[in-house]
Amino acid sequence: MPFGAPFPGGALVVTALTSATSANGTFSGLSFGTANSARYLFVALSHSETIGQSGNLTMTIGGISATNIATQAQNAISVETVASLWIALVPTGTSGSVVVGGASGLANLSLSLYSLVGLSSATPDA
């Protein structure tokens, strides 16, 4: 469902696209919404992995490298639970894959995918 808000430079339109789970880090056949030259795709990811691997995580969205903008890990005995936020400018395509890799022991992966149009910068701001 899209919603927007006035921001300097125009309106930001955010559309919740889908939620999905994966056992192996590949989320295939996801809806990316309407193609747009200013469309960023934003992923909220949660998963389990071997302790100490969260800095090694990588992600592509529609074959484009995504930037990790935040990660929080909670350690357990030998596994940590991780939540992270990712973003990539993906102007083309209406569907595709999100692929997560780089860490050992990945399990219990789930994501929520959003489209952001009108975002003035993908750089996090304190």
Image (spheres, rainbow, N blue to C red):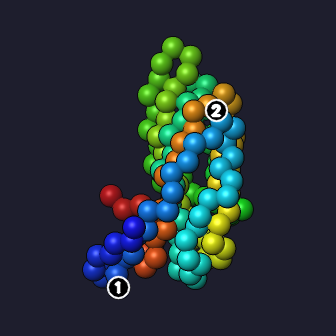
Q: In this view of the protein, which residue sits in the foreground, 41 or 72? A: 41
Q: Is residue 116 left or right of residue 126?
A: right
Q: Is residue 120 left or right of residue 90?
A: left
What's the residue at 65%, 50% (across, down)? 27
Crowd tier of the residue under label 2, counting other residues whose Cα lies within 10 Å: few below 14, some 14–19, many 20 or above? many
Q: Residue 71: image x %, image y %?
A: 47, 43
**Image height of 49 relative to 60, above or below:** above
Res. 65 in view? no
**Image height of 25 relative to 68, above or below:** above
Q: Quadrant of residue 23?
A: top right
Res. 32 in view? yes
Q: Quadrant of the N terminus?
A: bottom left
Q: Residue 60: image x %, image y %?
A: 66, 56
**Image height of 54 relative to 32, above or below:** above
The numbered dot on residue 10 is 1
Q: In this view of the protein, which residue sits in the foreground, 51 or 113? A: 113
* Residue where numbered disc 2 is placed: 106
What's the residue at 51%, 57% (across, down)? 18
Q: Is residue 106 left or right of residue 39?
A: right
Q: In this view of the protein, which residue sits in the foreground, 89 or 56? A: 89
